Image: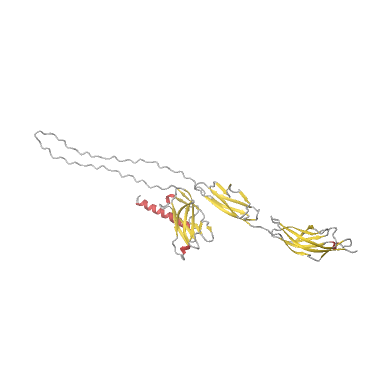
Amino acid sequence: MTSSQRVKAILVGLFLVFALVLASCGPLPARVDTSELEAVVGVRHGMEINLEDVPPTGVPVLCHGQAPAGVASIELYVNGMFFGRSSNTAAPGTHGFNYFTAEMSFAPDGPGAYELRCRTHDQEGRTVNSADVTIFLIGEVPTSPTVPPEIPTATPTSTEAPPPEVPTDTPTATGVPTDTPTSTARPTDTPTNTPTSTPTTPLRPVTIVSFEVNPSTVTPGGCAHFTWRVEGDVTEIWFDGEGVGNYPDSRDRCPTATRAYELHAEGPPGAGSDTESLTVVVAPGDTEGPSITNVDPIKGGQICVGTYCTPADRSLDISAVVTDLSGVSSVEFYCTVPGGSEAYCGPFVRSGGNNWLITYTPLKGVSSGTLTYRIKATDNSPRRNVSWWGTGYIQVFVGIG
């Protein structure tokens, strides 16, 4: 590589680092917050990077961590695989002990989508993951230029001429050797075909953009309705272990105890996956019957029986205030019947708000004396809880003509 090429490569590498640092200083993506720990990927979601601009050390990534107990280390995960860890060496009591930024890098395999995730570990052993950020690497991985071999040149060699021949008695002719330079043939360059790659469309990362349950709290026997929406190149979705479709598909679940339900979405290699969970709380529900108060009259009520009674004296209004968190289904009047046993003697009706009223007229055959009564109330909960109030007293007298 020539000096100008080396300078160009260094400048390109510095430009990429500068661009990623600027991206980390802009609006950060959504982050996971446990109210104590934070982990944030300092790269803009959806950012495109040309592979020709990636420095030899790999794609640089900034990870920001925060922990009230102090940041111990930050890890980098790419497409779900561990790529590196950076430990925090700041002393307790300093700003860097609680707020730590780690710069790590990863070597890409080639063009495509890469899902980045940072994980913060605090000094007490707790961890938190950042929201996933996807970047797209485009172009081709640069290759080192081939330097042509040096061409050897022919170097002729010289031979000194022998001294003149001295005639002898029998002269013989001696030939004079001549220099024959040797040469090496110049190698010729054979061009090679460089295959061209067809650009591929980057895969859209799999993301669960909505996962909801209504209601999130149920009573025993109650059900919750789940809905979801997943975006990206999705190949399969699983809810509570069941293969399901995307929106508007939904499911109902009727738990018997508090539990979590998981939604998991998968994509092809390069599109990643996503998982979310929701918890449905099963509350004990209403286990008590309605409250019955302010019964009137409890004692002192009188009813006239027989031929010589005015219409107003032949019946008695009995009222009560009945309340329940689940609502009141019914209020019933039970009284003494001829023979001395207790039986159902009629319903109360709602007279406004929580007030209930019955106008009681004794059955034929009821004689003078003390009549007792009780009140039964049933609520609207699935359990149909029942409560009783009693006992009240009514004086029955015979009219005199």
- Judged left or right of residue 112, residue 289 is right
Can you give x and y, in whole percent of width and height, for residue 387 in the image?
72, 59
Could you say which is closer to the camera, residue 107 or residue 243?
243
Residue 188 location (% of width, % of height): 33, 40
State the residue in front, 334 or 200.
334
Residue 219, picture quadrant: bottom right
Q: Is residue 181 left or right of residue 95?
A: left
Q: Nearer the viewer, residue 226 or 337?
A: 337
Where the C terminus falls, by quadrant?
Answer: bottom right
Measured as percent of width and height from the top left, residue 207 is found at: 54, 51
Tell me which colouring the rendered structure shows: secondary structure
User: What residue is at 46 percent from the left and 63 percent from the top?
Assistant: 97
Which residue is drawn at the image coordinates 46% and 51% (left, top)? Answer: 49
Q: Is residue 238 visible?
A: yes
For residue 285, what is the image quadrant?
bottom right
The answer to whether residue 147 is above or below residue 130 is: above
Task: Say whether residue 270 is left or right of residue 12.
Answer: right
